Amino acid sequence: MRKFSSFIACALSALFINVAFAQETIAFAVGEWSPYTGKDLKNNGMAAEIVSAACSAAGLNAKYEYLPWKRAEANVAEGVHFGTFPYKETKEREGRFLFSKTLFTSSFALLTSKDNKKTANFKYSRLEDLKGFSVGIIAGTDAIKVPLEQAGVTVEEVASAEQNLKKVESARIDFYIDDRAVIFEELKRNYGGDKKANFVLLDSSFGDKNDFKIMISMKYTNSNVLVGKVNEGLSKITESGEYKKILAKYGL
């Protein structure tokens, strides 16, 4: 009887230890935005690799569900998912979401077609320069959409970068604005040789460099505590050098 009791005590002790060290899973809703996020990308893309590493360093387990961007954002707002990324912190989002520390910094660029006579010799320096032109963006990219519409620019939203490239190629839109690394990745994936030469990536950046972060739900259980843990994890992987190694894998 004593042996049996000792066995039960050991089993319960082991169970409690496993529970104590089990990682809490937090749910992220993200869309496809290569090379940063993508269910078919290695480690789910660069941004997801950073988030996974930060969560692991904080004793958390990151779980990803891929959804259209607008639905992902709505789910986070409603507390269905903990967060979505990569997002820019804007005035429109303040008070509606929490934000993590910066995941990475990048800039937006403008792409047009050499065959589009309307954009020949175009030079960009400010938002108002785009008046009279049609601009394509990825649906849900409010950091681009809001300032463009406020400046009176015609904005068309689609679900993917590939769709925007096709619309630029056929001159159904004059410009496609997106993250510079994303445009390079999509051109490399979808076009090559002479076809790639038909596109023009303007030297001027659209706006300033952007800090991309995790946009976090205010309604998700313990989100205030969890965002602190994720930030601690980001600090840990930065201090350990793991963050720098991840960026280096993507040429950054």
Image (tube, rainbow, N blue to C red):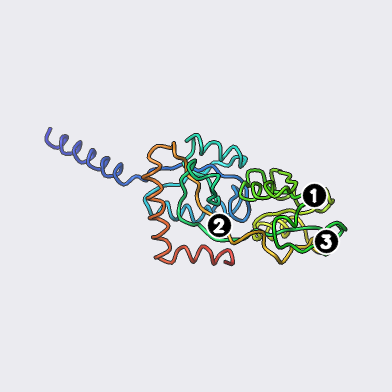
Residue pointed to by mark 1: 173
Image quarter where the C terminus lies is bottom right
| Residue in front for this viewpoint, 34 or 216 | 216
Nearer the observer, 236 or 115: 115
Q: Is residue 147 above or below residue 193?
A: above
Q: What residue type is labelled 3?
A: Asn
Give the x, y percent position of residue 228: 38, 50
- Among the two numbered marks 2 and 1 on one chain, the one whose residue lies closer to the N terminus: 2
For the residue carrying disc 2, how many other residues have a C-alpha within 10 Å: few (<14), some (14-19), or many (20+)?
A: many
The amino acid type, in three-letter code, at marker 1 is Ile
Circle 1: element type:
loop
Q: Mark 3 points at which residue?
A: 198
How many neighbours does mark 1 have within 10 angstroms: few (below 14), some (14-19), or many (20 or more)? many
- Kindly identify the amino acid type of the residue bearing the numbered disc 2: Met
Disc 2 to disc 1: CB gap under 8 Å: no
The secondary structure type at the circle numbered 3 is: loop
Give the Cα distance between marks 3 and 1: 15 Å
Image depth: mark 2 or mark 3 in front? 3
66 and 204: which one is in front?
204
Pick the quarter of the image with the N terminus: top left
Closer to the chain start, of discs 2 and 3, is 2
Instruction: Tell me the residue at 26%/44% (across/down).
Output: 17
Residue linked to disc 2: 46
